[in-house]
Image: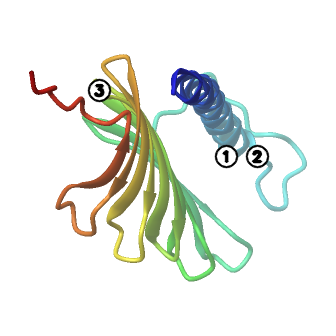
Amino acid sequence: MGSNADELTRRLARLERTMQLWKGSACVLLVMLSAVALLGVAPGQSQLFTAHTIQAQEIELVDGNGLLRARLATSENEVALVFTDANRKPVLFVGVTKEESGVSLMDAGRSRLMLSNGIRGTAIDFFDDKEMPRIEVSMRNGKPMLSVLKPGLSGIVWSVPEQPTPRKR
């Protein structure tokens, strides 16, 4: 039984490293997209637009048909980058708040997979068709956990490590 727990711990540690890589990649992507949006060539011009400082609360990227494809926005409490499909449905969300950062992969606007890191810990959540979390791999308070959740946030079906059962004496 000890080797199974050790294997799970190794897998969760590898998953933690992968999540850190995803977070770093998302930050690099955000910076690159901002640079492309801010320093792009305007139609009909041959010179790059340059400026020392550009300030905006929102930047929208549109395709050749004028359809919104990405939005970078900030508010008092959040910075978010959202990519949309041709039907204007979100397909990728990258967000940062004071308490949490996360990446969410979506299908026609519905969350399917979320990577998050914040004050509650680090987690990967898998969602069902009703956008309810069904599987969670997490590291909360330094403790790894894998949980299969009941539909509708009504509890845990299965979890590793399981809650210890008190022994009868």
Residue at far top of view:
142
Count the numbered circles shown: 3
In the image, what residue type sits under mark 1? Ala
Residue 161: quarter of image: top left
Q: Is residue 168 visible?
A: yes
Sequence order check, earlier mark of 1 and 3? 1
Q: Nearer the viewer, mark 1 or mark 3?
A: 3
Sequence order check, earlier mark of 3 and 2? 2
Helix, strand or loop at mark 2 = loop
Instruction: Tell me if 168 is positioned left or right of 65 in this view.
Output: left
In the image, what residue type sits under mark 2? Gly
Say which residue label 2 marks. Answer: 40
Q: Is residue 97 visible?
A: no
Instruction: Tell me if 123 is positioned left or right of 68 in this view.
Output: left
- Label placed on residue 98: 3
Residue 73 at x, y percent in the picture: 42, 47
In the image, what residue type sits under mark 3? Lys
Say which residue label 1 marks. Answer: 37
Instruction: State whether residue 57 is above or below residue 157.
Output: above
Tell me the CA gap for discs 3 and 2.
Answer: 30 Å
Residue found at x 63% / y 35%: 22
Instruction: State whether residue 83 is above or below residue 28.
Output: below
Q: Nearer the viewer, residue 25 or 30?
A: 25
Residue 139 at x, y percent in the picture: 40, 27
Q: Could you tell me if the residues under marks 2 and 1 are in contact, i.e. CB atoms within 8 Å?
A: yes
Residue found at x 65% / y 41%: 38
Residue 82 at x, y percent in the picture: 51, 55
Q: Nearer the viewer, residue 29 or 117?
A: 117
Q: Nearer the viewer, residue 12 or 159?
A: 159
Instruction: State whether residue 77 is above or below residue 58.
Output: above
Q: Residues within 10 Å of mark 2 (few under 14, many from 20)?
A: few
